Image: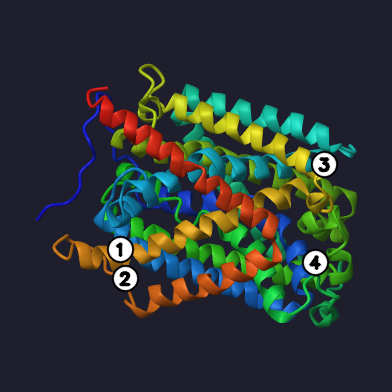
Amino acid sequence: MSQPTPSPVAQPSLVRAMGLGMAVAVVVGNVIGSGIFAKPGRIAAEAGDFKLIMVAWVVGGVLSLMGALSVAELAAMLPQAGGLYVYLREAYGKLTAFLFGWSEFLFHRPASTGALSVMCVVNFSKALGWDCSAADQVMISAGIILSLSFVNIVGVAWGGRMQVVTTVLKVGFIIMIILLPGLMWLLGKYQPQWSNYGTSVTPNQPNFATQFAAAMLAVSWAYDGWHGITPVAEEIKDPQRNVPRALFVGIGVLALLYITANLSYHLVIPMPQMVEPKENQQLVATLTLKEMFGPIGQTLMSVGVMLSTLGAINSNLLYGPRVSFAMGRDRVFFSQLGAVHATCRTPAFAIAVQGLMAVVLVCASLGLTAWVSYFKDKSLFDILTNYIVFSASLFYVGAVASVFVLRKKHPEWERPYRTWGYPWLPAAYIAFYAVFLSFVFKGNPGEALIGVGLIAAGWPVYLIWNRQQTRQPNS
């Protein structure tokens, strides 16, 4: 029985040093960044109805689990660095894999890093009571990104320790949000507003389908990165068992935290207050603690969100370069991207490029809000995250569809885990996203076109690069 193996390269091999506990922490810590703190207000504005909002959060968790149930088969079968890049390569060929790697490393991951840095700065300024301008946001965001890029270049050990600490802190903050209204009520210091569950506002979108699609776009950002353990599968002990387990446990924890946190938000903050643009929509968690504790609660939550987003930025810079590492190993892009620094033992060049791309995208988003009328009423955070979700979802659908393709292409490959509910579960995932993305395109054409355009820009790059490699086979 033959299975694809990584191309040999003149560099140290990766070490399987991560157990199940760390793998679960990577799933949870990678996903929890800013979405659960920053998106509930936007979701309320788009949906306008509490019941629809909660349905969107539940559906988001179910879809992530469906995706995980499908991708787990691929991860157990192909436990290699690169994750979705590897699955797309084996199913559809190097061009499709390259387009994913191109988008992930040069646009998607940097845009995620940029959006998180903007949210980090927003909460930093709130904690200090400072009115931070858009230009200030960009400069400080750039400083954060470059600083954490340098830390991850210097050594992976510090970055790994920071990831564990920030994951514990962010989960702790969410649990605090969930429990505080009930605890304060029992102590007689706060009266929950149960009537909030029945309030509604006029939604931004004109009909139910576009309302739900817009809400799901925001929810998908909160769940984005559920597959983040797969790029580091080559560094996990017993990956055939631990990668699927980490996906299932991690996503289950995330869904439970997200749904209960939103119940807590809406119990404290009336929806009309929650949807006020722009700051209230991004600071619902902060408003929740401020309502119960006053300015001290606002400052506390701002610090918590800031730490959470710092951890998510670090996560992006920690695992994101594994995709480019796989591309370098396949020799479909610059070989430097797959290189490991001789002293630091990190993919230094890949991390540096990713950090710089994040800074570029934050600056470009500032220009969009200033000069393009379509984006003037949208925050930097929303522009970056909407682009990410649309473009990334295209590849998530392709990865899930790979389960069908590879079962036909390579039935002889060993599958330690086989997708539960096959073929109906992955088919349902694909069908939902086909409809969802069509409505997203109608409701957010600017961000969708940016995503498609940046992906398509990789096609001529691949053709030019492949032609040069053909002419110089020994390069």
Amino acid type at circle 1 is Glu
Q: Nearer the viewer, mark 4 or mark 2?
A: 2
Q: Position of residue 334 (x, y in %)?
A: 39, 28
Q: Residues within 10 Å of mark 1 (few under 14, many from 20)?
A: many
- Camera sees residue 393: yes
- Camera sees residue 386: no
Amino acid type at circle 4 is Met
Q: Residues within 10 Å of mark 4 (few under 14, many from 20)?
A: some
Residue position marked by numbered label 2 in the rendering: 419
Instruction: Please give the name of the residue rendered at 20% of the width and 48% of the height, measured from the top-left corner.
Output: 4
- Tell which of 354 and 129 is nearer to you: 354
- Between the C-alphas of marks 3 and 2, the distance is 47 Å
Q: Residues within 10 Å of mark 3 (few under 14, many from 20)?
A: few
- Between the C-alphas of marks 1 and 4, the distance is 45 Å
The answer to whether 207 appears left or right of 85 in the picture is right
Q: Are marks 3 and 1 in contact (CB under 8 Å)?
A: no
Q: Earlier in the sequence, mark 1 or mark 4?
A: 1
Q: Nearer the viewer, mark 3 or mark 1?
A: 3
- Between the C-alphas of marks 3 and 4, the distance is 47 Å
Which quadrant of the rendered structure holds the N terminus?
bottom left
Q: Nearer the viewer, mark 1 or mark 4?
A: 1
Amino acid type at circle 2 is Thr
Residue projecting furthest to the top = 343
Residue position marked by numbered label 1 in the rendering: 73
The answer to whether 324 appears left or right of 283 in the picture is left
Instruction: Please give the name of the residue rendered at 62% of the width and 26% of the height, measured from the top-left corner.
Output: 147
User: Image height check: is 5 above or below 218?
Assistant: above
Residue position marked by numbered label 3 in the rendering: 371
Q: Nearer the viewer, mark 3 or mark 4?
A: 3
Q: Are marks 2 and 1 in contact (CB under 8 Å)?
A: yes
Residue position marked by numbered label 4 in the rendering: 184
- Between the C-alphas of marks 2 and 1, the distance is 6 Å
